[in-house]
Image (cartoon, rainbow, N blue to C red):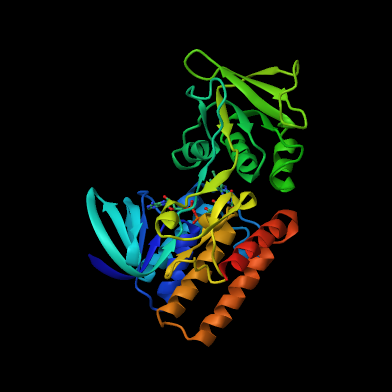
Amino acid sequence: MKQIEMAVIGAGPAGLGAAVEAAGHGVRVVVFDENNKPGGQLFKQIHKFFGSKEHLAGIRGFRIGAELLAQAAELDIDVKLGAVVYGLFSDRQIGIVHQGVKRLYQAEAILLATGAAENTLSFPGSTLPGVMSAGAAQTMANVHRVLPGKKVLMVGTGNVGLIVAYQLLQAGARVVALVDAAPRLGGYAVHAAKLRRAGVPLRLRHTIVEVRGKETVERAVVAEVDENFNPIKGSDEILSVDTVCLAVGLSPLTELAWMGGCRFKYLPGLGGHIPVHNQNMLTTSPGIYIAGDIAGVEEASTALEEGRLAGTAIAERLGYLSFEQAKVKKEAIRSRLDQLRTGPFGAKRKSLKETLVKEWI
Ligand SMILES: Cc1cc2nc3c(=O)[nH]c(=O)nc-3n(C[C@H](O)[C@H](O)[C@H](O)COP(=O)(O)OP(=O)(O)OC[C@H]3O[C@@H](n4cnc5c(N)ncnc54)[C@H](O)[C@@H]3O)c2cc1C
């Protein structure tokens, strides 16, 4: 079994942010990611981030990912790709399959930064080729440069639905409509405005009822819903589409935290069951930290800052930072997180995160 100081599971913004922060203070870090390309979701994000300069506003997501990777290389961080972490066992042991070989590592501190998985939806025809998650469509278009289809229906108006719909439009697809059963948009008005300016209809209180097609998607049936989200009889409309993208929420990938014995709290506003953690991103299992979407689904910028917070706390735990040095750094990061958690969406997330911290005590 190999001994390491800090193991990071997941090379998205949270994992890389933590690794760079901790390694910058002298911690020896190994990062594991099951993908062959690091960066998590960042490499799909071709749009510019917003917020302030401190939050990397104006920089495109994939460039932020590239910059983090360059910093990781400079700090000599060992990033193992194609490395699936299949288990977290007692005494902070982790089981990995890397390049077909099984290995066990024992770490002094572990950061779980595994992100979130996209939710799905079942309806007649939902298994036809052409029905896919919005993230899959985003990967096809932005990473592999393949347009998933020419006429797209997007289900869901959260930020993922709005952003991916606009990116598909930019890539040359026709976005026939976005539907959402909720009476209000789920994402930021700024993203919706771009679609509206391009003439894309955003239909609230509408849902997908069925997808029709012989071998692939040919048509989608949408309908208006009542206040109980049941389709209203006679309101069916048939849309001619070849692709249906589902952007119906994300659920934190928490399997390793369950295995690690972490205590959980169910908070639907953060994506479901979330490991309880304190202000330093430490879970209720000694030495196991979390950051990013696993700690509650938010955004790439909050994931990066939470990663930095966990990285600082781990550097302190392992003796690379004094209590006072860590305190100054952590307070600066927490203040940036507070700035990110403002506005109607952010303020709600902030109060839910505070619930988790209170539970930890
Ligand atoms: C489709 C989609 C579009 C989005 N668009 C935007 C956007 O435009 N702007 C924005 O701010 N946010 C966006 N987000 C949200 C943002 O990308 C996430 O909040 C952010 O990436 C979370 O960072 P993370 O590091 O927690 O997780 P991720 O970026 O998801 O990274 C997690 C990493 O962990 C790895 N991993 C998971 N389990 C294991 C395991 N067992 N072993 C090894 N590796 C593992 C995964 O392969 C992945 O690389 C989007 C999210 C999705 C799903």
Would residue 78 be visible to someone looking at this image?
Answer: no
Position in image of residue 242 (x %, y %): 55, 22
Q: Quadrant of the N terminus?
A: bottom left
| Relative to 175, 182 lies left or right | right
**Is residue 119 placed above or below 242 in the rendered structure?**
below
Name the residue rendered at 46%, 58% in the picture.
113
The picture quadrant where one finds residue 69 is bottom left
The picture quadrant where one finds residue 81 is bottom left
Name the residue rendered at 76%, 37% in the picture.
183
Question: Of 311 and 272, which appears nearest the observer?
Answer: 272
**Is residue 39 placed above or below 153 in the rendered structure?**
below
Q: Quadrant of the C terminus?
A: bottom right
Position in image of residue 64 (x %, y %): 51, 59
| Relative to 301, 348 lies left or right | right
Position in image of residue 56 (x %, y %): 59, 62
Name the residue rendered at 49%, 24% in the picture.
127
Would residue 247 be visible to someone looking at this image?
Answer: yes
The picture quadrant where one finds residue 347 is bottom right
